[in-house]
Image: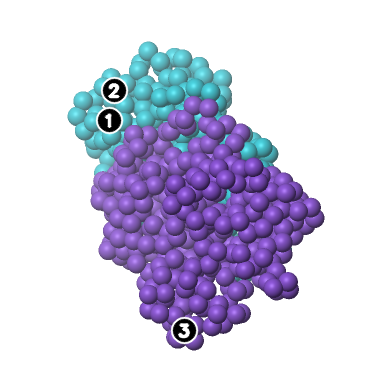
Chain colours: A purple, B cyan
Amino acid sequence: MTNGDASSAEDRLIARYFRPLVTHPGAFGLLDDAAAIAPPAGCDLVLTTDGVIAGVHFFPDDPPGTVGRKVLRMNLSDLAAKGATPVGFLMSIALPGEIDEAWIAGFAAGIGEDAAHYGCPLLGGDTDHTPGPIAVSIAAFGAVPHGKMVRRATAQVGDCVIVTGTIGDAALGLTLRREPTLAQKWRLSDVMVAQLVERYLLPQPRNALAESVQRCASAAIDVSDGLAGDLAKLCRASAVATEIDAGRVPLSEAARAAIAADPALLETVLSGGDDYEIVLTLSPRQLDSFRSSAQAAGVAVTEIGRIAAGEGARFVRDGCAVSLPRPSYSHF
Amino acid sequence: MTNGDASSAEDRLIARYFRPLVTHPGAFGLLDDAAAIAPPAGCDLVLTTDGVIAGVHFFPDDPPGTVGRKVLRMNLSDLAAKGATPVGFLMSIALPGEIDEAWIAGFAAGIGEDAAHYGCPLLGGDTDHTPGPIAVSIAAFGAVPHGKMVRRATAQVGDCVIVTGTIGDAALGLTLRREPTLAQKWRLSDVMVAQLVERYLLPQPRNALAESVQRCASAAIDVSDGLAGDLAKLCRASAVATEIDAGRVPLSEAARAAIAADPALLETVLSGGDDYEIVLTLSPRQLDSFRSSAQAAGVAVTEIGRIAAGEGARFVRDGCAVSLPRPSYSHF
C-alpha cells in the first residue's frame, strides 16, 4: 500500500481509494515504505491484530462497506477491552485476480468512515494478489498509561463480573443469515430479525468505555469468541473461578424472544461469538464509578456474577448447570 | 494467536510452536488479547507491514524454515531502509483446512531463529483457517530518534546514490528456480546456481547498517520491487532525477557470468525485485563516514550515480539508455 509507482494497478487502487483515508501526518500520504508515530508521552503502545477472510468470517455478498467497518471494529474492540485509546492501524489486503473495483470502493468508504469516527486513522499497508478469497488483516495500535494495559490475568477473588451491552445477538443474527426461515420458528418480528442480523454485520465496539475500563477494571477481555469461552479464558489466566447466573446475562428483546421460543438457543447466545462486547472484573469499590461512566457514555453495563477462588467459568440457570459443550468459537 | 483456550487446536499449535518464540515481556506469553510496548524514550515507532502467500510469493515446496525467515526479513529490510532498530512484530497466519504440522514446526523454527538473531521478537498474532493457500502477514515495528525516520521524499540535488550488497541475484535465482535448465545456457557453475537460488530464498536485510543510514542518508528505500522501479519511486517522491551507469551497479560473480552469457538479463537484474538491499542518497560530505560504517559492518556499499534536477531514474550502459519496459514488480 506504500508502493509509489503510479503506473501500476496496485498504486492506482491505493491512490484512488485508500490515500483519501489518510489523515495522520506519520502515514506520509502512503507514499513511503513505513509510517512513523510518536506514542503520547508516558504511554505504552498496545498492539493487536485480527482479520477476516471471505467465506470464513464474512459472506462474499455481505455489503463491502460493512466488511470494512467490521474488520476495523474487531480490532477496536480489542483496544477497548485493554483500556487503550486508538492511535491508528496498518492494513494488509489480499485480492483475487479479478479485482472488483466496486467492492474495493465500498470497503474503503466503510473503513474510512469508521477510522474517522473512532479516531483510528490508516497509517499504511500492503496489497497483494491471491489465488484464494479476499483476505484483510489489520494491526491496530492504541495508547494506555505506561504499565496500565488491562490484562486478562489479573482478576481478583471478590471482584464483580461485568458485561457491556447485550450478548448473543450476533450469533443469532449469523444463524438467521444462514437460515432465514428460522425467524418464523423463533417467532421474531421483521424488526427483530433486522436487529439481530445488523448486530452480526456491524458490531458496536465499546471504545467509549476504554478510559473507564482502564481506570476501574482489574481484568478484561473482549467478547469475540463467545461469552462462556472468553470468560473461561479470563478465569484460567487469572487462576480464579466464577459462577454466572445465565438469567442475569443481558439480552436484547429479540434474543429473549428467540430463547423463549427455543430454549436451546441459550447455548448459542452464551457461546456463539462475534459480540464485541467487553467482559471485565472490578473491585466492588469501583462499581459505582464504572456505572456512572458507562451511563454517561450511554452504554448499558450489567453485573453478572462474582469472582471466586477455584477454576473455571460455570453458567447456571434456575440452579442447574447450563451445558456448553463448545463454549468458544475456534477457527480450527 | 492470543487465544487462551487450551482445548482448541489453534491454541495447541500456538502453545507448541509459537509461545516458545516469545521473549518480550510485553507479549504476555501470547496469553492476552494484545501486547504492550514502550518505545525507547525520545523515539518514534516506525511501522511497516508485508506478507507472503503460497504460490504467489513462495513455492509451496520451499523449505518452511526459509519461508518464515524470508517473510520476517522482508519486513526487517523495510525497517533498515528507514534507519529503524527492530522492536518486534505481530504475525497473522491463515492456514488451509488440513494443517501440515511439520510445515508449521519448520516455519516457526525458522522465524524464531531470525527473531532472535535480529532482535525482533514476536509480540502477538492471529491464526485463522482459510479455504485458500497459506498466507502470512507481518506488521513490524522499529525505533528511530523522534522525527528522524529516513524518508523516500527527501533526496537532494547533488547527493550520491548508494546501493548496498549486490543487485539482481534473487531475480536470477527465482528464474533458475522456475527453469533450472537455464543454468547451462547461462554457463553457471553449480556453486553459482546455488548462490543465486539462496539469495532468492533467503534475503540478507541490511539491519547492520540501519543506524548509519539513519545518521547519514538524506533519503532511502529498500530494494524489494527492483532497483529501477524503487529508485524511480524515490526520485518521484523527492521530485529529482538520476542517471545511473548500469556498469556501476554492484553484481555478484554469478550475476556477471549470467549477463555475460545473456546480456538481456541486465533487465532482469535491474528490475527483477526481491533484492532486499537498500538504495539511499546522501550528501557527498557523508560519504566517507557512511563507507567506514559499512566497512565496519562488513557490508559492501557502492556509489552508482548522483541526484540531479529533473525527473525519473534512467539507466545507461556504454552511453545508451537501458530499456526497462517493466521497471518494477507489481502484484497486479
Q: Residue at x 28, y 19 (%)?
A: B158
Amino acid carrying mark 3 in the image: Arg
Q: Which of B305 and A63 is in front in this view?
A: A63
Crowd rating for badge 3 (residues with CA inside 10 Å; few <14, some 14–19, many 20+): some
Decide if residue B164 is in sight here: no
Chain designation of label 2: B
Amino acid carrying mark 1 in the image: Ser
Q: In the figure, B285 relative to B197: above or below?
A: above
Which residue reaches farthest left? B310
Q: Mark 1 points at which residue?
A: B238
Of the image marks 2 and 1, the number of the one nearer the N terminus: 2
Q: Residue at x 49, y 49 (%)?
A: A294
Q: Mark 2 points at which residue?
A: B156
Pointer 3 and pointer 1: residues touching (CB < 8 Å)? no
Marker disc for residue A187? 3
Residue B141 percent location from the top left of the image: 51, 37
Label 3 and label 2: CA atoms lie apart by: 71 Å
SS state under label 2:
loop
Residue A143 percent location from the top left of the image: 50, 37
Pointer 2 and pointer 1: residues touching (CB < 8 Å)? yes
Picture quarter containing residue A216?
Answer: top right
Label 3 and label 1: CA atoms lie apart by: 64 Å
